[in-house]
């Protein structure tokens, strides 16, 4: 389809959002109405009114027994009228545990991209007891026929690199291909901002070796994946000492500020998710990219595609997603303590209100609670636009206060301004409530880095204590009252950990099944093994030295 055809189709979808949604629900109930799951509630009926009256709102724990039965070999019609061909695996790092969702490969599709250095990778497939494949959404897409039929010129890396399951070899080859073709790179992409930051850190530790490969025209011996060796050797194309010298000259400078545009001078934007908990990486990416536009193109998950960003060059804090009414049947649970049972349809949400989306899709999820909190920011024709606010339930609490993901990220933005005075960057964080002390208190684990390349992190006690105080001052009035007036919350603590600690934490979660490219550092951590990794790397501890003002 041409661009004009896509735009015309978008206009039709969003103008007729209610009719598109009603037709989609009718089709889903026609296909799935006789499944074992829906028969319990619909008793043969398949109209919208019966669906809304009788089918309950559910969480993953409610539908997991049905999904597990199909995974173990029972017929797909336990939960869906579609034939299940494979299962998508969630990352498990934001919601606390990994989940599998049934799909059919015919629905896996993508968006054609231009010439781009994209940090794509896959992980080895696992299977259900019945033999159906399980993989993260990214791996399922990369192994789909759609991706295989994309023209290779879309990416600087060949398919053999993208499909390499060894994370280190994959990353190294992506960077090597990108450096050799640096003049052709017009954009840089990764699924999440955190993974792009990992790529930059990898470049910082491997640029000398990469330059050696470019100078000699030969790839390092430790790259043992045959597909990577053969395909990347073709791209190297022989010795290139001039390019190697240029890259060495840039990478050996004292500061890496603007390094992305220095190495890839024709890059116009960075495409990655920078909303929600990924917003913590915005200052880091702006530092390394000379503030190239950060584009968050779509809002999607293992459960469904929700919407697209129709203003891709907007500021990261202004990103909103226009919901696509043909993706799934969407309902919305109003996030309002006074009326938290009100459910509205897609076209009936109200501007400024907060909602949790409910998803009904082709593969057995019915009125499924996503656990995301969204705010309505506007409408495109009759289709609402939402900004991602936070994940539901990701909170800190010592007493009766509730400190949300949004509260934490706002406070860290304020503390980041204090860090600027010490020329330090916050590279990673997580937090938890320490109730081993009385009163309990909030603990933040921070990994810091000097802005000068290979610079030593010098911790200024005054600056770090001020960061503690600024975070507390940023929290809501209930936190501040409990902390200052009643003394029922202890002084906030920052524990600075050694560089590489959050890489070790990521490796732990990946060893438990998380996908490398989909991994998100948990904002709040409770896993004992994860806390043990962090505690083992603590270099220094700082506490707020004053109570926050009321």
Image (cartoon, rainbow, N blue to C red):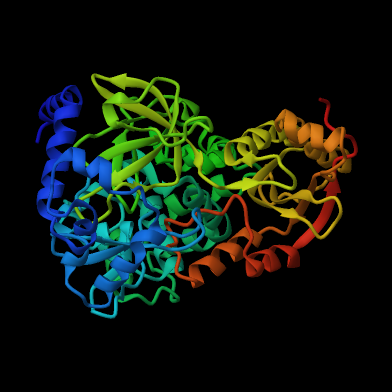
From the viewer's perspective, tell me whether residue 515 is left or right of residue 481: left
Which quadrant would the C terminus be assigned to in this image? top right
Query: Residue 9: image x %, image y %?
Result: 13, 29
Image-quadrant location for residue 35: bottom left
x 53%, y 60%: residue: 206
- Nearer to us in this view, 300 or 416: 300
222 relative position to 84: left or right: right
Q: Position of residue 513 (x, y in %)?
A: 45, 69
Residue 322 found in image quarter: top left
Q: At 12% across and 42% down in the image, what residue appears?
A: 26
Q: Is residue 106 visible?
A: yes
Question: Which quadrant: the N terminus?
Answer: top left
Task: Decide: is 94 above or below 98.
Answer: above
Q: Is residue 232 visible?
A: no
The image quadrant of residue 4 is top left
* 155, 492: nearer the viewer: 492
Question: Which residue lies at the image location 32% right of the left edge and 57% below the top edge?
Answer: 138
Q: Residue 226, percent across and down?
A: 30, 76
């Amino acid at each position: 389809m041409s661009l004009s055809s896509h735009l015309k189709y978008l206009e039709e979808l969003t103008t007729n959002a209610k009719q598109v949604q009603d037709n989609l629900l009718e089709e889903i109930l026609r296909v799935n109405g006789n499944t074992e799951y829906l028969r319990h509630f619909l008793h043969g009926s398949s109209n919208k009114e019966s669906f809304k009256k009788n089918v309950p709102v559910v969480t993953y724990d409610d539908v997991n027994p049905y999904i597990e039965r199909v995974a173990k070999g029972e017929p797909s019609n336990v939960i869906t009228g579609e034939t299940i061909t494979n299962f998508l695996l969630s990352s498990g790092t934001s919601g606390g545990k990994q989940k599998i969702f049934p799909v059919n490969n015919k629905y896996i599709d993508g968006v054609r991209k231009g010439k781009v250095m994209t940090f794509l990778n896959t992980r080895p497939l696992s299977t259900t007891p019945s033999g159906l494949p399980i993989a993260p959404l990214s791996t399922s897409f990369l192994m789909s026929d759609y991706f295989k039929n994309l023209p290779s010129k879309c990416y600087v890396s060949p398919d053999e690199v993208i499909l390499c399951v060894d994370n280190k070899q994959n990353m190294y080859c992506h960077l090597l291909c990108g450096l050799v073709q640096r003049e052709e790179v017009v954009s840089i992409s990764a699924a999440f901002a955190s993974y792009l930051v990992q790529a930059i850190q990898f470049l910082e530790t491997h640029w000398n070796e990469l330059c050696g490969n470019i100078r000699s025209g030969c790839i390092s011996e430790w790259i043992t994946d045959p597909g990577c060796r053969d395909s990347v050797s073709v791209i190297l194309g022989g010795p290139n000492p001039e390019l190697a010298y240029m890259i060495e000259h840039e990478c050996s400078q004292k500061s890496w500020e603007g390094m992305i545009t220095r190495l890839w001078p024709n890059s116009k934007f960075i495409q990655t998710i920078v909303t929600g908990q990924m917003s913590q990486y915005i200052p880091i990416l702006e530092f390394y990219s000379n503030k190239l536009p950060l584009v968050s193109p779509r809002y999607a998950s293992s459960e469904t595609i929700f919407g697209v960003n129709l203003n891709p060059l907007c500021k990261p804090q202004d990103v909103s997603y226009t919901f696509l009414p043909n993706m799934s049947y969407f309902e919305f649970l109003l996030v309002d303590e006074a009326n938290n049972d009100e459910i509205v349809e897609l076209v009936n949400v109200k501007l400024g209100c907060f909602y949790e989306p409910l998803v009904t899709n082709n593969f057995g999820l019915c009125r499924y609670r996503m656990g995301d909190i969204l705010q309505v920011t506007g409408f495109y024709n009759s289709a609402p636009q939402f900004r991602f606010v936070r994940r539901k339930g990701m909170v800190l609490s010592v007493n009766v206060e509730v400190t949300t993901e949004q509260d934490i990220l706002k406070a860290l933005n304020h503390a980041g301004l204090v860090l600027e005075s010490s020329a330090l960057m916050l590279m990673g964080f997580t937090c938890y409530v320490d109730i081993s002390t009385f009163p309990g208190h909030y603990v933040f684990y921070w990994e810091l880095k000097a802005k000068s390349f290979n610079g030593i992190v010098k911790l200024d006690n005054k600056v770090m204590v001020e960061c503690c105080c600024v975070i507390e001052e940023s929290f809501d009035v209930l936190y501040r009252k409990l902390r200052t007036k009643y003394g029922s919350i202890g002084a906030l603590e920052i524990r600075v950990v050694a560089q590489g600690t959050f890489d070790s934490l990521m490796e732990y979660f990946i060893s438990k099944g998380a996908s490398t490219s989909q991994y998100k550092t948990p904002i709040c951590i409770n896993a004992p093994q994860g806390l043990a990794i962090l505690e083992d790397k603590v270099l220094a501890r700082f506490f707020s030295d004053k109570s926050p003002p009321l």
